[in-house]
Image (tube, grey):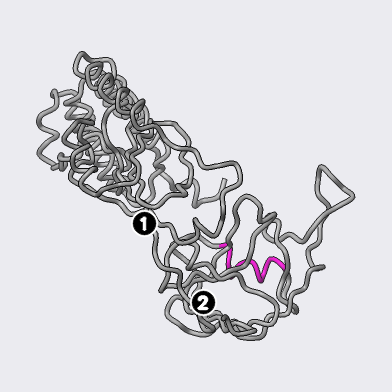
Amino acid sequence: MSQAFQSLVPPPVVALAKLEAAACRDLAAARVTLGLFNTIVGDEPALLFPKYRWRLCDVNSLARALAASASEIMTWGAQRHVILNPLLASRATIARAVSAQRRESPHGRRQRAIANRYRKMYPQVRPCARPVRARTLNLHQIDILSDEIGRPVGEGLLRLARAFRPTQIEFIAHGDGEYLSARAGTIRIRLGEDGYTVVSISLTLETPAAKRPRIVMGFLEDFFETGTEGVIWSLISEEERGYDALFPIEEGDHLTIQDQLGRKLWSGKIRCDRKSGWRRYPLNSKYGQPSALGHWVHWTQRGFKPDDWARYFIRPEHDRMRGILRRNPPAG
């Protein structure tokens, strides 16, 4: 094992187990423990206690033995090279336990009955089997009614939602698949794991179609979705939203690639090499297509090795390359 891996420090097992066991039984202990874990990890993915802000002195509200375990976890979390996986797994276990306690409590059963009634009244509307793509290109979802997040479903929420004069309202239970809405004016209310707490509310809006510009500035993107049959090298415009922001890079376009500070890394006319990196499909050896960095792609810029070209696009979201794309022929 390398020295770098040997220097990583896992959390104290006994202290973590004690905190997890107590938090899975008691909501007050869960609130403080999750607050501590979220502080170490640096995020708050679960809206279990939306109005709660963890403070160091909150540890003193725990029993003495648990407070000692929490202090041990804090000391460990203050180190630079720590292994977070056990902490993340424990946090997920506690979150599930909190949701289960709320779901099965007398209050939870009453609230779930209310939420289930609304789900029957306002079910999610599945799109038609062959949606008209042109109608969905300019639809965008925005978050609304942020003050209602973390609250149980009730008639007050419905009154606020109806004030937007929606074309339809949809309730989505935890774990249900979510379909792209094909209708402007739809309000979607997603419920949490306990079955009745609101975790998100969105409104679908339709924006006017934008004229496709000839020169586009934005970020390089390894775009793919069902039907693209591989990654499409693209540029995401900073000026547009949704599908309007997507500009696939095509033969004859001129592309300038920059780092995040705008320094030029490469510039040239796009010449598609559709043979470099060609591989047979594992389950259908009669056919194949180019690949790069383990992804099926459609082409590589002539003169590049496939993996080298793909590294400009296949990157973490926080480390995207910038680009200037000049369309050819000019967009109409």
Q: Residues within 10 Å of mark 1 (few under 14, many from 20)?
A: some
Closest to the observer: 208 or 280?
A: 208
In the image, 176: left or right of 268?
Answer: left
Residue corresponding to mark 2 = 212
Residue corresponding to mark 1 = 205
In the image, 206: left or right of 250?
Answer: left
- Kindly report the distance in space between the C-alpha atoms of the residues bearing marks 2 and 1: 20 Å
Specify the quadrant that holds the N terminus. top right
Counting residues from the start of the chain, the first of labels 2 and 1 encountered is 1
SS of the residue at dot 2?
Answer: loop
Closest to the observer: 123 or 57?
A: 123
Closest to the observer: 307 or 50?
A: 50
In the image, 151: left or right of 10?
Answer: left
Q: Position of residue 156 (x, y in %)?
A: 16, 35
Q: Is residue 202 above or below residue 115?
A: below
Amino acid at pointer 1: Leu
Q: Is residue 160 magenta?
A: no
- The furthest residue to the right: 286
The residue shown at (51%, 77%) is 212
Q: Is residue 313 magenta?
A: yes
Q: Position of residue 229 (x, y in %)?
A: 70, 54
Q: Residues within 10 Å of mark 2 (few under 14, many from 20)?
A: some
Q: Position of residue 108 (x, y in %)?
A: 23, 19
Specify start and end residues of the magenta stretch as a single range: 306-314
Residue 27 lies in quadrant: top left
The residue shown at (64%, 84%) is 329
The residue shown at (68%, 56%) is 230
